[in-house]
Amino acid sequence: MTGSLSIVDGWPGSRHAAIAVGPEGVRDLHGEVDQPFALASVTKPLVAYAVLVAIEEGSLELDVGLPPERGTSLRHLLSHASGMAPDEQRVVAPPGTRRIYSNAGFELIGEMLATATAIPVEAYLREAVLTPLEMTATSLDGSPAHGATSTATDLARFATELLTPTLIAATTLDEATTVQLPGLDGVLPGFGRQSPNDWGLGFELRDAKRPHWTAPTGSPRTFGHFGRAGTFLWIDPDARVGCAYLGEVDFGAWAIDAWPAFSAAVLEAAAR
């Protein structure tokens, strides 16, 4: 795959890091792969993975009811179907009726995780996910919705885990990357209204969404997340390829065309 990642040198900003992985680990890398960058909402899949560990341990349950002002269940919160407002813990739609992307929902998930395990969310994330995967440059300092920093090297370790899970059962990851509450419409931030706007448990799903930030040539089963800080992580489970990008320029109009074309080039190179 050598050379396919150098496309990022033409993107805004002077500092970039891109890395591609397969089940065996890193296939290609480019740029400042050991430089920490803000993850923004790429924090969410990391926290969701810690939640999945807690579920398997028996500390949390997906479908235990919550008070009406906080949605109906952890499943609803993880899949942005709780009806909670984007940035405040206030329900603005009946749970299970709309896909409302909610940072506030992930703040509540962090509270639930900390309460259930009696461990602060940042410490539980480190214990359950970061340390076992040797993600030593990753930290959560603030919001479980958008407060982590990491390196491309660390995200490559997480991407490899998502291709071949070791911390949770493969069946658990399969459920987390399968559509939850199918058929819900909603807005995919930066890409407009999607019908349906499918999500898994903390992972955004490509499915048939148009437009989308991942490769138009990729599998509908592609899952991942992107962040306002200009970061993304995606996994194509059919191609058995994952890719992460970190940069210093926030997501904007430049990324809407650049990211899908780049991701398509990564998949093409991996198939050679």
Image (cartoon, rainbow, N blue to C red):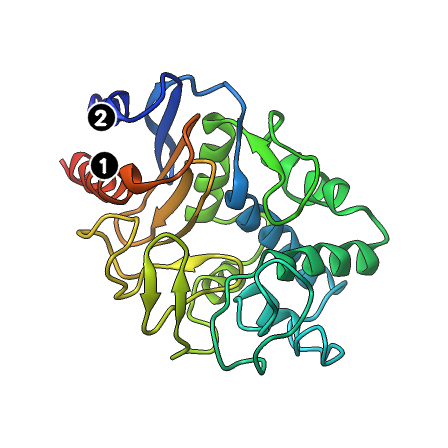
Tell me where residue 147 sits by quadrant: top right
Label 2: which residue?
7
Front-lying residue, 121 or 40: 40
Q: Residue at x 70, y 40 (%)?
A: 142
Q: Quadrant of the N terminus?
A: top left
Image spot of residue 271 (x, y percent) = 17, 40
Q: Is residue 56 left or right of residue 188?
A: right
**Local crowd size for mark 2, using a 10 Å CA cut-off: few (<14), some (14–19), many (≥20):** some
Q: Residue at x 26, y 48 (%)?
A: 239
Front-lying residue, 20 or 197: 197
Q: CA distance from mark 1 to mark 2?
A: 7 Å
Contact (Cβ within 8 Å) of mark 1 with mark 2? yes
Q: Is residue 244 left or right of residue 36?
A: left
Label 1: which residue?
262
Amino acid type at mark 1: Phe
Front-lying residue, 115 or 173: 115
> Regarding mark 2 in the picture, which secondary structure is present there?
helix
Q: Quadrant of the C terminus?
A: top left
Image spot of residue 234 (x, y percent) = 37, 46
Q: Tell me which numbered mark, 1 or 2, is placed earlier along the sequence.
A: 2
Asked if 126 appears above or below 56 in the picture, the reply is above
Q: Which mark is residue 272?
A: none
Image spot of residue 19 (x, y percent) = 36, 29
Image spot of residue 198 (x, y percent) = 39, 68
Amino acid type at mark 2: Ile
Q: Is residue 268 left or right of residue 37?
A: left
Q: Residue at x 44, y 25 (%)?
A: 248
